[in-house]
Amino acid sequence: MPDRRKVRVGFKVIHRHRVGSHVFRRVSELVFVEGRPKALLAWIDLGGVRAPLYACELDPSKLRAPKRIRGLYYYDATTADPRFDELSEDVSRMAR
């Protein structure tokens, strides 16, 4: 793609996100894989093709869409970044 600054059209989800001990509000892209919602946390560029790198599964019962805004969802739970969950497990094991 010559112009990667163009806005990508798709679903967005606003959710609380935990990285280590910090929790903050975040906007992520939302996709449905076999009917199951997933928040896409990071992307990688493979030879000019954008591919998802990290995703987290969302509980469909905690996902809601406002009626006035198309393509936007709210998630009523906290997601966790899998990259930092693995790191915190390693640190816990090393501390023992």
Image (tube, grey):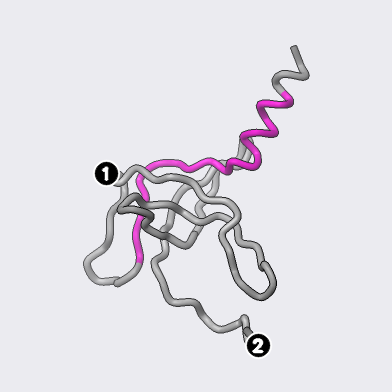
Seen in the image, is 15 located left or right of residue 85?
Answer: left
Specify the farthest residue to the top.
96
Viewer-closest of 17 and 83: 83
Relative height, residue 77 to residue 38 (above, below): above
- The residue carrying pointer 1 sits among few (fewer than 14), some (14 to 19) or many (20 or more) residues within 10 Å by Cα, namely few
Query: Which percent across, then down, holds residue 8?
Result: 49, 77
**Amino acid type, residue under disc 1 in the picture:** Ser
At 74% from the left and 12% from the top, the residue drawn is 96
Corner quadrant of residue 73: bottom left
Q: Residue at x 27, y 44 (%)?
A: 61
Give the side of residue 16 with respect to residue 2, left or right.
left
- Disc on the earlier residue, 1 or 2: 2
| 95 horizontally vs 10: left or right | right
- Where residue 68 appears, as percent x and y from the top left, is 24, 71
Residue 45 in the image: x percent, y percent?
Answer: 66, 68
- Residue count near mark 2 (Cα–Cα under 10 Å), binned few <14, some 14–19, many ≥20: few
Task: Kindly give the residue lying farthest to the front in the view shown.
Answer: 47
Instruction: Measure how far apart labels 1 and 2 are at the Cα level.
Output: 39 Å
Q: Is residue 42 above or below residue 48?
A: above
* Residue 79 sits inside the magenta stretch: yes
In the displayed structure, would residue 40 be above or below residue 69? above
The quadrant of the image that shows the N terminus is bottom right
Type of amino acid under label 2: Pro
Q: Secondary structure at mark 1?
A: helix
The reply to whether the magenta stretch includes residue 48 is no
Tell me whether circle 1 and circle 2 mark residues in contact (CB < 8 Å).
no
Residue 82's spot in the image, x, y percent? 59, 41
Residue at the disc numbered 2: 2
Span colored in magenta: 72-91
In the rendered image, which residue does mark 1 sit on?
61
